[in-house]
Image (cartoon, rainbow, N blue to C red):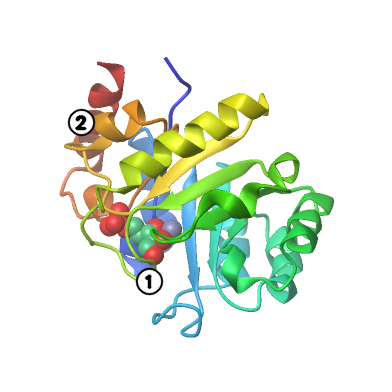
Amino acid sequence: MRDYLLAPSILSADFARLGAEVDAVLEAGTDIVHFDVMDNHYVPNLTVGPMVCKALRKYGVTAPIDVHLMVSPVDRIIGDFIEAGATYITFHPEASDHIDRSLQLIRSGGCEAGLVFNPATPLHYLDYVLDKVDMVLLMSVNPGFGGQQFIPKTLDKLMEARRLIDASGLPIRLEVDGGVTAKNIRQIAEAGADTFVAGSAIFGAGDYRAAVSAMRAELAL
Ligand code: DX5
Ligand code: ZN
């Protein structure tokens, strides 16, 4: 069995109580904090920036923070997130003028770097940079909002990405983001994902521990 990671997306958390919410989902058995950064430019929504990442570290969050940049331009915010305590920093290749440079910037700051693929973005952006990537993130919804339906075609793309990663022999995580629930997580894992973002399926549940256990149970089958 793969080493599976559950990544609750704080997009669906109660922002007025963010520290406590993050503690609660981690205590419920999740592994990494998925931190959605939206700029009302690359995507039609506005969320949080490096200050909030830094505040979570100051508050005492020690789990990895998985920063998903939905911003354009990309490069000028990378340094701030490195300084704010990000663990992973992923960005959309269409949003960067110089993908190789952005990846190098992230790694040179000691963070893990990743590329994010929208549902209609081809995987060929990986062709010449696979060795500079620690994470491949496939969007299974169009970015911008939580609570959308999983796009089934993502399963084919996951299989393709899994083949690429396995053929490379590199230790690259394959993450999926959007519409992940206890009902579809097993199928998503079977298609090759090892890291699962879930926003509404966890934060929208009354009992976080029960929601996380239901996902883990599906992964253990
Ligand atoms: C969407 C974000 C996701 C979102 C997922 O642009 O990148 O991380 O929060 O939310 P759910 O799990 O509700 O689809
Ligand atoms: Zn995300």
**Which part of the image, by quadrant, shows the C terminus?**
top left
Asked whether mark 1 and ligand 1 are closer than 8 Å, the reply comes as yes
| Residue 91 drawn at (x, y percent) | 59, 61
| Residue 84 drawn at (x, y percent) | 68, 62
| Residue 81 drawn at (x, y percent) | 68, 63
Is residue 88 something that shows in the picture?
Answer: no
Indicate the amino acid at tag 1. Answer: Gly
| Label 1 neighbour load within 10 Å: few <14, some 14-19, many 20+ | some
Q: Secondary structure at mark 1?
A: loop
Q: Secondary structure at mark 2?
A: helix
Q: Nearer the viewer, residue 179 or 88?
A: 179
Q: Is residue 197 above or below residue 56?
A: above
* 3D distance between C-alphas at marks 1 and 2: 26 Å
Q: Mark 1 = which residue? A: 144
> Is 94 positioned to the left or the right of 130 in the image?
left
Which residue occupies 43% across, 27% down?
Answer: 4
Instruction: Report the number of discs.
Output: 2
Which is nearer the N-term, disc 1 or disc 2? 1
**Which part of the image, by quadrant, shows the N terminus?**
top left
Q: Is residue 113 above or below residue 58?
A: above
Q: Mark 2 = which residue? A: 214
Q: Mark 1 or mark 2, which is nearer to you?
A: 1
Is residue 106 something that shows in the picture?
Answer: yes
